[in-house]
Amino acid sequence: MLDFFGKSPEKEDLKSRTPAGQYLTTKFPVLTYGPTPRIDTENWQLRVFGEVKEEVKFNYQEFMSLPQVKFESDFHCVTTWSQLDNTWEGISTKEFMKKVKLKPEAKFVLLHCYGGYTTNLTLEAFDDEDTLFAHTHDGEPLSAEHGWPLRFVIPKKYAWKSAKWINGIEFLTEDKLGFWERNGYNNNADPWKEERFW
């Protein structure tokens, strides 16, 4: 555990950016349920389906041709570590949503991943201003362990909502719990409210 907290202005700023119950680390721990998928970008595909007017499928080249962004944000894991000042590069959700025509009934999103993992969000949370589909972290391509070739990143939620190895986005009229949400984790996952478990 790194003790950054104290009374200097710089340390006070770090404390204000760290939710209760979290400790700071400069490492990027790997936490995964199940084996790590090894995905060839030649065969990678992202399917967009559910409450959409037309189902869409992207191959890797098509998806990477969308406008790129770079965001800096903090990252909070439910297992109590936080890493500040992460730089993510990829495609913003706002930009991605320009390619999707939703039915008016769509209110929720279920993210699907290689390996069978899922996690759920409200449409509002999914389409927030700082969410993105990341392929690069701190100037380096994501490792397979951290979600290569594409991971969803949602800084305002605990990190299990930042799904690795994403390959499907399902839009829904009603909420449908994902893997960890079915197994005891809080559905909303706000680190600032310590919404860790049921």
Image: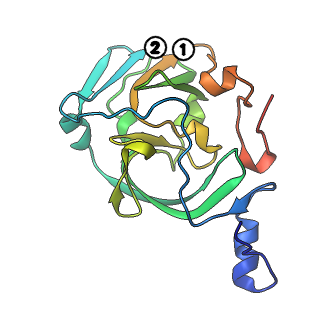
Is 130 left, or right, of 89 in this rendering?
A: right
Q: CA distance from mark 1 to mark 2?
A: 7 Å
Q: Residue at x 32, y 15 (%)?
A: 55
Q: Quadrant of residue 19?
A: bottom right
As shown in the figure, which amino acid type bears the numbered disc 1?
Glu
Give the percent coordinates (x, y) of residue 39: 29, 33
* The furthest residue to the bottom: 8
Give the percent coordinates (x, y) of residue 47: 34, 21
For the C terminus, which image quadrant? top right
Is 116 left, or right, of 19 in this rendering?
A: left
Q: Residue at x 57, y 21 (%)?
A: 107
Q: Quadrant of residue 26?
A: bottom right
Q: Residue at x 79, y 45 (%)?
A: 194
Callouts 1 and 2 close, C-beta under 8 Å: yes
Residue indicated by mark 2:
51
Tag on residue 73? none
As shown in the figure, which amino acid type bears the numbered disc 2?
Glu
